[in-house]
Amino acid sequence: MEKTWMSLTAGILDIICGSIAILILLVLMIVGGISGIVMPMMPRFPELMPALLWWLSIPAAIIAILAITGGICSLQRKNWGLALAGSIAAFFPLWLLGIAAIVLTVLSKEEFK
């Protein structure tokens, strides 16, 4: 099968979305740390906000790792299942780019080993 631009583009989109998810992760962790310092000064539920932000950072980390790994697989045209999973994970940080990555990954299935 001839190699086309579709899997290459899907991989780049996955990596972009994964990088955005890493930025979201960093923001959640920084805000969680800052709120852990500031929130005890507030009267209601001061301990819940940092914990909530730290717990939200776990899905962001999983999404980032999966999107970047899937993007690398798509660039190398290996392991179509992981490339598709990475494209689906890329949907969450930026849904428009994620949809494009999913469509391009599905259309380029024959290019994968």
Image: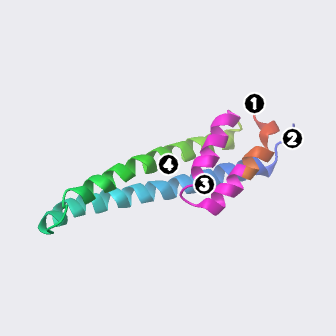
The foreground one among 111 and 61 is 61
Q: Residues within 10 Å of mark 1 (few under 14, many from 20)?
A: few
Amino acid type, callout 2 = Glu
Question: x%, y% of residue 101?
Answer: 68, 53
Q: Is residue 47 shown left or right of residue 89?
A: left
Query: Does residue 1 sit above or below 46 in this rendering?
Result: above
Work out how far the residue at label 1 is from the one at label 2, CA to CA, in angstroms. Answer: 12 Å
Question: x%, y% of residue 99?
Answer: 68, 56
Amino acid type, callout 1 = Lys
Q: What residue is disc 1 on?
A: 113
Tag 4 or tag 3, which sits nearer the N-term? Answer: 4
Tag 1 or tag 4, which sits nearer the N-term? Answer: 4
Q: Is residue 35 shown left or right of residue 41?
A: right
Q: What residue is disc 3 on?
A: 91
Work out how far the residue at label 4 is from the one at label 1, CA to CA, in angstroms. Answer: 24 Å
Q: Is residue 82 on the magenta stretch?
A: yes
Amino acid type, callout 4 = Ala
Task: Report helix, strand or loop for mark 3.
Answer: loop
Query: Which quadrant of the figure has residue 41?
Result: bottom left
Work out how far the residue at label 2 is from the one at label 4, CA to CA, in angstroms. Answer: 30 Å
Tell me which segment is drawn in magenta: 79-102
Say which mark, if any, is on residue 2: 2
Q: What residue is disc 4 on?
A: 64
Q: Is residue 23 shown left or right of residue 18?
A: left
